Amino acid sequence: MLSNLAEIEQEIRSFSVNGKDELENFRLKYLSRNGLLTQLFEELKNASKEEKPLVGKKLNEVKRLAESIYNDAKAVRDQSESSGTDIDLTLPGRNFSVGTEHLISQTLAEMVRIFREIGFKVTDGPELEEEFYNFDALNTPEHHPARDMQDTFYVQNKFDKDKKYVLRTHTSPVQIRTMMSTKPPLRIISPGKVFRNETVTFKNYFMFHQLEGLYVDKNVSIRDLKGVLSYFFKKFYGEKTKTRFIPSFFPFTEPSGQVDVSCFICGGKGCKTCKDTGWLEIGGCGMVDPNVFKSVGYDPEEYTGYAFGVGIERIAMMKYGIKDIRTFYQNDLRFLDQF
């Protein structure tokens, strides 16, 4: 019987009691009413007089060992449960994914950093905007197509029937609000969300982000505009990046221009991305229309200025080779983890 107890002692010492189920199995096998040690105590009465003291002593030692192992493991278990954790030390460690900023946020931060280097301040404004700031003050005629319900989200206003509200279609209203409260000189950028009533496709979305810039002072010329945008795109896309300006039209600038950058995929030689032109359309710009200055109380005879705007999603898609704007908003970790 002593040799049998030695084997049981070794078995108890090697028994794994890390998990909840293992702990209960240990109790049932050795310490329960029908457990192995209880059975051995029952068999002790059948031992000879010479053997009984030795066997009894050893049996008590083995029982105390089993109780000690069980109680220690149960205390650790109870403590982990009371602290709200459920730790199984036998399981492999958990791998945690380290979060990062969304690619839109990363792109915006880089753009802001570059413009701040050359003296631009960041301004912000409401996304739910009065029609006056979104259209009227920006020299947009009453019957301009941009005001149509097909392009703009109008918001019903039950409290003030004299004012119409829209989800802003660009961040230019921030420039209007800033000019109305600040005297020149003025050098600002206004990044943020904008909304268009457009069909969602691989290149269009009903909500996206813009960064617009404005500089107002005496004797500001289109040469200053070209210099700032050329500097920005060289910093953002690389020193070899070239820019060109093509005549265009916007109600709030005159003259107006479309800004293109040399294709950084093919180096301007022509490829599928740039449709073999060597150039990629990137945004719009122009000199602030005098009518805009009049609407904010600036003297157009004394001050001139330029404005520009670029889509942040478009900037990021071109830089990182992203083909579908919807990818930014699908929360697919396979995409997000790449950045």
Image (cartoon, helix red, strand yellow):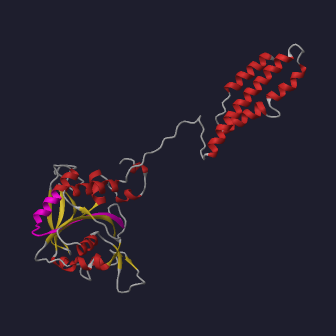
Residue at 88%, 18% (x, y): give it. 47
Q: Residue 132 falls in which quadrant of the image?
A: bottom left
Q: Is residue 274 visible?
A: no
Q: Is residue 295 rendered magenta in the image?
A: no
135 vs 147, nearest the viewer: 135
Rendered view: 142 above or below 56: below
Rendered view: 1 above or below 232: above
Residue at 13%, 59% (x, y): give it. 227
Can you name the residue that lies furthest to the top here? Answer: 50
Q: Which residues are magenta?
A: 205-230
Instruction: Name the quarter where the N terminus is drawn.
Output: top right
280 vs 308, nearest the viewer: 308
318 vs 114, nearest the viewer: 114
Rendered view: 90 above or below 283: above
Residue at 19%, 72% (x, y): give it. 183
Q: Is residue 285 visible?
A: yes
Can you name the residue that lies furthest to the bottom here? Answer: 162
* 100 relative to 287 in the view: left or right: right
Residue 230 lies, in percent from the top left, at 15, 57
Q: Is residue 209 rendered magenta in the image?
A: yes
